[in-house]
Image: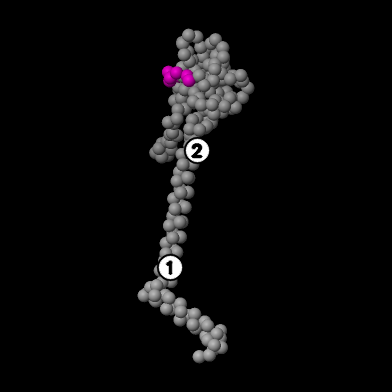
Amino acid sequence: MSTAESTSPGRVGENRKKLQEKCLRIVSPVSPARLYCCYAVIIVLTGAVIALSVALSLSGKTEQISRNNTYAVCPRNWIGFGNKCFYFSEDMENWTFSQNYCRALGAQLARFDNQKELNFLKRYKGSFDHWISLHRESSHRPWMWADNTEYNNLVPIRGEGDHAYLSNRGISSGRDYMQRKWICSLPNSYTLQCPEVSQLV
């Protein structure tokens, strides 16, 4: 065979093919078709593992997000914030009447557990003062919530009274016989009670 014949384009391709076949036989006694099939299966499985990993990581984030953004389902005319429901009265009454009104609804005068809830109450109360559940037996006793847990003094309470209300200046105190609007709050465990189907028919 002459040099010209061995370097012709057709001959070079043929030589290359023979060389590849020899290499494949050395590397693997399996036919090239089976080898390519194995490569295809490996690529498909790798893609499936990656897709499954991404799907699982996203579902974990969605679950975490849904836990953080839990909101209460509130009755009509109540406003939900976080996992509590609040009712802002239209009428004005004394502290005792206001507390009894809230209890009749299965609630209590408003309680806030953090600065965000307090800011929410101040924003929605409008320009009127509203009774909240903080009270004390005397000026020498600690402030208590309606459920008799002690107030953590998150915000100082102004005034010399024994019953607290939300004012434009923050939390103030006054005499329980004064007429003010009030805010009721439903506890964290509140769930909307739906009537049974038989009651609706």
Q: Give the quarter of the image for residue 41.
A: bottom left
Q: Is residue 104 left or right of residue 124?
A: left
Of residues 63 and 130, which is closer to you in this image?
A: 63
Residue at mark 2: 69
The x and y percentages for residue 196 are 40, 37
Residue 75 visible (yes or no): no
Identified at 45% across, 56% down, the residue is 50
Query: Which type of secondary structure does the marked residue at label 1 adopt?
Result: helix
Q: Which amino acid does label 1 sit on?
A: Tyr
Of residues 146 and 28, which is closer to you in this image?
A: 28
Residue 123 visible (yes or no): yes
Q: In this view, does 176 lie to the left or right of 56?
A: right
> Which span of residues is magenta-colored?
146-152
Residue 39 marker: 1
Q: Which of marks 2 and 1 is in front?
A: 1
**Residue positioned most to the left:** 29
**Residue positioned most to the right:** 127
Identified at 48% across, 32% down, the residue is 83
Query: Which type of secondary structure does the marked residue at label 2 adopt?
Result: loop
- Residue 74 painted magenta: no
- Residue 150 painted magenta: yes
Of residues 47 and 105, which is closer to you in this image?
A: 47
The x and y percentages for residue 14 are 49, 83
**Label 2 Cα neighbours within 10 Å, binned few <14 / some 14-19 / many ≥20:** few
CA gap between label 2 and label 1 equals 45 Å
